[in-house]
Amino acid sequence: MKKTVLAMLSASLVVGTAAGASAAANPFSDVPAEHWAYEAIATLAADGVIEGYGDGRYQGARNITRYEMAQMVAKAMAKETGNPADKGLVDKLAAEFAEELNNFGVRVAKLERNADMVKWSGEVRYTYTSERTEDNTGKTKDSTKEALLLRLEPKAQVNKNWNVHARLDSSIDTKKDDTGDVELKRLWAQGNYKNFNVKIGRIPDATSYDKNLMFFTQLSGVEVNFGNKVKVQARAGRINKANLRYEQALNRATKRKASEDVASIQSLAVTVNPGKLSLTGAYYHLKSGMFKDTFYSRGANEENAHIWEAAATYRFDKNVSLTGAYMQNTAADYYNRSGLLHLAYKGANKLHQGSWGAYLSYRHQGANTSMYPSCDGAFYNTKGVEVSAQYTIFPNVQAKAIYFRGKQLENDRKAEKLFARVEYWF
C-alpha cells in the first residue's frame, strides 16, 4: 500500500512540533513560503523528522513507499512527545508499519554498533606538591613541584564482549616550563562476560579495596576477574622497577641503584561483601635481582618477595566508612610491614556540584612491602597521619588537598608533605 506525502505529513504532525514552526527556516527549494504546509514542513525538517531527498527538494507531490513511511514513524517515535493523544497516534502508526520498523530497526542497530566505535575521555589536571624531610644530621630538605597533565583515554568497541583501552599521558613542569613527551601508559584488550572478565596487555594494577597499600600502577600481562558475591582476581606478568618505586627508596637509603629493570609478578586476591562489611585477602609474589641488596635482606641474595595482605572495610551508613589493612613481606628483613587505618566521610562526586568528602588516615608504608601504594600523601618508606578534603567546584571540576605529617622509616626523622590538585574531566 502506498500513501501520499499529504497523508505522511498529517501523520508526522503527531510529534507536536508544528506549534513552533514559524521560527524554523525552510531547507527545501520546492516548498514556497505561501504553501499551506510550509511551517509544518520547515519545523519537522529542523527537528530531523523529515529530510527530503538530498538535492535540496522535498518532492511533496510524489508518492512514498511503506519503507519511507516507516522511517518517518521511527523518527516520530524517537521524539518522545508528552502529549498522550499524540503518543496514541504514533503507536497506531507503529502497529501499521510494524514489519518495516522491525527491518529498519535491525539495520539501524547494525549501523549503531559499527558507528562511533571509538570513544574518548580524559582529564587535565594541575598538581602542586611540597615535601620536607630531615637527613640523619637534622638538616631540612625542601622540594616543590608544579605540574600540568593531559590524560587521554580512548576506548574502542570490538564486538559485544570485547573492547580495547588505552591511556596516554603528557605532562608539563610549570616551574621549568618543560614539556614532556606523550607516553603510552596503558594498552589492553578486555573481554566482558557474565560474572567474568579478562584483561590482556599493559593493564591497570590495583587491588580491589579503596586506598589499598600495595599497588596502584600498571603491569604487562594478564588479569582475570570472576565471581559475584565472592570475587576472585588473578594476575600474572611483569612490572617495571619505575612502577614499583622500590628504586627511589633504595637510592635514598643506600645511594645505589637497582640492578634489574623488571620483576615478574603473580598475584591472587579474594573479596567478599557480607552486607556492610567488605573483606579482602591477597597474596603477591615478585621475583627480581633488584631485591639482592642489604637494604632488602641480610644475606643480600634474595630474589623473591612474598607479600600477604588482609583488609576490611565497614560502612556504617552511606556517609561514613572505616578501612583497616595489614601487609607483610615474609622474604624481606627490612621495612617488611605496612598498615593502614582510614576513616572516610562522604565523598566528592565529580558530576555533582557542591559534593564533598574528607578522610583521616594513619599509614605505615614499608618500602619492601608497599612498593607503589595508592596514595598522594604519605611517602614511600614513611609512617604518619594524613588528612584530606575534596570538593566538586563545578560538574567535572574537582579540587582536593592532602596534608601528611610523619617520619621516615630509615632514620626516624621528619617527613612532611602538602599535596593539592585541581582536575577537569571530559
Image (cartoon, rainbow, N blue to C red):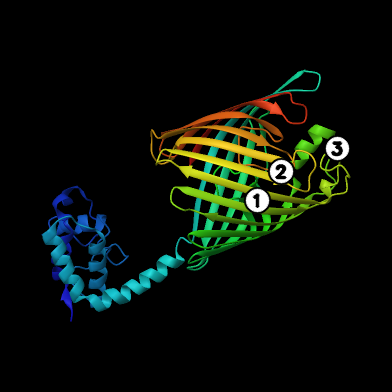
- Considering only order in the chain, which callout, 3 or 2, is on the residue closer to the N terminus? 3
Left or right position of 22 against 345? left
Vertically, is 117 above or below 304?
A: below
Residue 256 is tagged as 3
Q: In which quarter of the image is residue 139?
A: top right
At numbered mark 1, what does the secondary structure look like: helix, strand or loop?
strand
Judging depth in this view, the residue of 4 and 74 nearest the camera is: 74
239 and 92: which is toward the camera: 239
Q: Residues within 10 Å of mark 3 (few under 14, many from 20)?
A: some
- The image quadrant that residue 63 belongs to is bottom left
Q: How far apart are marks 2 and 3 (CA)?
A: 19 Å
Residue 218 - label: 1
Q: How far apart are the alpha carbons under marks 1 and 3? A: 24 Å
For discs 1 and 2, the disc positioned in front in the rendered view: 2
Residue located 48% across and 53% down the image? 273
The N terminus is located in which quarter? bottom left
Q: Mark 1 vs mark 2: which is more N-terminal?
A: 1
